[in-house]
Image: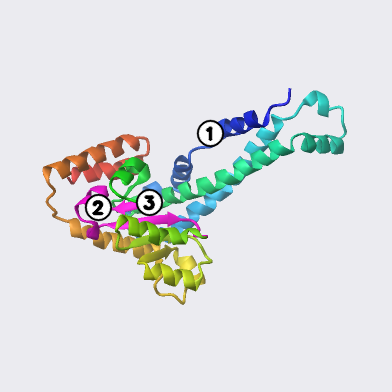
Amino acid sequence: MKITLNKYKQLIKNERNDFFLSPFDFIYQIFEDLELVTKNKNFFRKNASLIAEQLRELSWKKYLPLENEFTSNMLKLLINKDKFEKLNSIDSITSFCQEFVEHIYALFLSNTQSRRSRAGKEFETIIQLILTGAGIAADNQGSVGKDEFTKRGLAKLVDFVSPSVVEYVINKRNTLLISAKTTLRERWQEVPEEMNRTGAQEIFLITLDENISKEVLFNLYESNVHVVTTKKIKELKYSDNPRILSLEELIEICLDNSKKWNGFKYSEIEKEFVLNSLELKLEKYKDYKFIHKFYEEAKKNI
């Protein structure tokens, strides 16, 4: 019996969840394969751009054959062997495409949407691992939860706050807000708008977009949105714009900013919130030794 379109769409969703690792696990696995878990803070601070490019490139190379395998498996589920084995190759293909044109379209549309969704989440994971490796404390929605960001007045476009949400509540001026977008497209206009909603004075926008126009760059700069990219992209595409920052430069800015909190006297309530937050992170990342170790050290320093 031919599977209905709606059932096939649900099947695609279920099978996709079972077949692919989560974006975080996928990137973390590649991170381990590259033996980046063995590198020290100085390595990350000096090679952030290279690390970001390597992880992006390898994740794409690794993902494509997996997607091909998944697509093949899903198409096979539509085949009626008794029907098609009676036809020659050309007739089989023609008949299959005619009968399941909507199903095939649904599968490829799902692939496209999944790629876009995963690309953003994978990029955020890459930035998280680089910041962690460089010894920079930064909360993101993955580590503290989306609800916590919303409750604290952090907008949907803010992906990281450094040193953490606690410091943001205490003194916004001494915290850094970071957004990560693989490409800007038309969404660049959302960033200044979200800044107005949060009351943030500035935000650092990490992107791999190589085609940002001078007009857009100017408008972002005027809105106190500092564009950050890799050294390679900066040199090849934006060498005439000194306002563009490299990932390495952003890391230095984060390190300088963290010094503002050295010796800060937290209230008992604030200290309790910090400790509870660290306990949640330690539990969340208990199977990810590289990140778990970072939070263990942070807890010792409270």
**Label for residue 42?**
none
Residues 131 and 269: in front is 269
Q: Name the residue under label 2.
A: 168
Determine contact: label 2, label 1, CB under 8 Å.
no
Query: As rendered, which of 7 and 59 lies closer to the eye?
Result: 7
Q: Which amino acid does label 2 sit on?
A: Tyr
Q: Residue 159 carries which label?
A: 3
Q: Which of marks 2 and 1 is nearer the N terminus?
A: 1
- 10 Å crowding of disc 3: few (<14), some (14-19), many (20+): many
Please provide percent x and percent y for residue 142.
37, 43
Q: Does the magenta stretch include residue 101?
A: no
Tell which of 82 and 113 is nearer to you.
113
Residue holding disc 1: 17
Please state if 295 lies on the left or on the right of 208 as rendered: left
**Does residue 193 sit above or below 281 in this rendering?**
below
Type of amino acid at the residue the image marks with label 1? Asn
- Please report whichever mark, 3 or 2, sits nearer to the chain's N-terminal start: 3
Tell me which residue sits at (23%, 59%) in the image.
Answer: 174
Q: Distance between the residues labelled 3 and 1?
A: 24 Å
The picture places residue 248, in percent across and down from the top left corner, at: 37, 63
Binning the other alpha carbons within 10 Å of mark 2 as few (below 14), some (14 to 19) or many (20 upward) gives some
User: Is 296 above or below relative to 226?
Assistant: above
Q: Which residue range is magenta in the image?
A: 156-185
